Image (cartoon, rainbow, N blue to C red):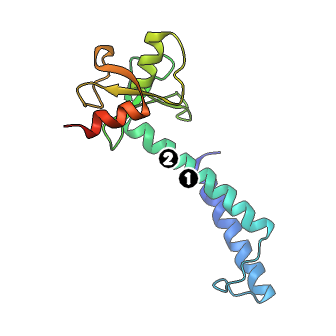
């Protein structure tokens, strides 16, 4: 389903819901929110529309990465490189991905990959170090 079809379906369902609520004498702004099949459909379509827009936005700002499994990358607001799968549904932080490849296994959830030079976009293996949470906290609080 493309974006125009989604928009059209949302408009049709909203109009049908408005008509049904008017027939029932229900005021839309009342505290009682009737849960109908139409309102459920609106929620599902709005969720699909949101996901479609999110993916289109990501595609518009994504750059090509050097990783076959994750062909796209975006630098997030914190400066970390985020890797995305081709359908933009799977995401991985590049520094964790590089460390996992270097050590030949998946990282545990309690293993933190620390950037030695404190630059979150410098993901050279020489700049990365595995630490635990308490060690990582110390590294960032000590002067």
Query: Which residue is at the front of the view, 75 or 122?
Result: 122
- Outermost residue on the bottom side: it is 25
Q: Quadrant of the C terminus?
A: top left
Residue 41: image tag: none
Q: Is residue 120 left or right of residue 20?
A: left
Query: Which residue is at the front of the view, 110 or 34?
Result: 110
Label 2 near label 1: C-beta < 8 Å?
Answer: yes
Q: Which residue is mark 2?
A: 54
Residue at left offset 36%, top offset 40%: 76
Residue 136 in picture, x, y percent from top left: 36, 32
Q: Quadrant of the N terminus?
A: top right
Residue 10 vertical position relative to residue 90 in the rendered view, above or below: below
Residue 114 in picture, x, y percent from top left: 35, 27
Residue 80: quarter of image: top left
Residue at left offset 73%, top offset 60%: 41
| SS label for mark 2 | helix
Residue 123: quarter of image: top left
| SS label for mark 1 | helix
- Sort mark 1 into few (<14), some (14-19) or many (20+) by Cα contacts within 10 Å: few
- Asked if residue 67 can be seen in this view, the reply is no
Query: Which residue is at the front of the view, 129 or 27?
Result: 129
Quote the CA–CA distance across marks 1 and 2. Answer: 6 Å
Residue 98 vertical position relative to residue 2 in the rendered view, above or below: above
- Sort mark 2 into few (<14), some (14-19) or many (20+) by Cα contacts within 10 Å: few
Q: Is residue 68 left or right of residue 4?
A: left
Residue 50: image tag: 1
Residue at left offset 51%, top offset 19%: 69
Residue 97 in picture, x, y percent from top left: 45, 21
Query: Which residue is at the front of the view, 5 or 22?
Result: 22
Residue at left offset 52%, top offset 27%: 86
């Amino acid at each position: 389903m493309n974006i125009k079809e989604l928009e059209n379906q949302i408009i049709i369902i909203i109009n049908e819901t408005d008509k049904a609520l008017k027939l029932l004498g229900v005021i839309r702004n009342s505290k009682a929110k009737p849960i109908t099949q139409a309102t459920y459909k609106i929620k599902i379509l709005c969720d699909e529309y949101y996901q479609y827009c999110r993916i289109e936005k990501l595609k518009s700002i994504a750059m090509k990465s050097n990783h076959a499994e994750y062909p796209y990358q975006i630098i997030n607001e914190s400066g970390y490189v985020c890797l995305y799968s081709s359908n933009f549904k799977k995401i991985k932080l590049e520094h964790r991905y590089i460390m996992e490849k270097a050590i030949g296994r998946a990282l545990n959830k309690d293993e933190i990959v620390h950037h030695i030079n404190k630059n979150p976009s410098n993901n050279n293996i020489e700049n990365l170090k595995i630490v635990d949470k308490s060690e990582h906290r110390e590294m960032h609080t000590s002067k």
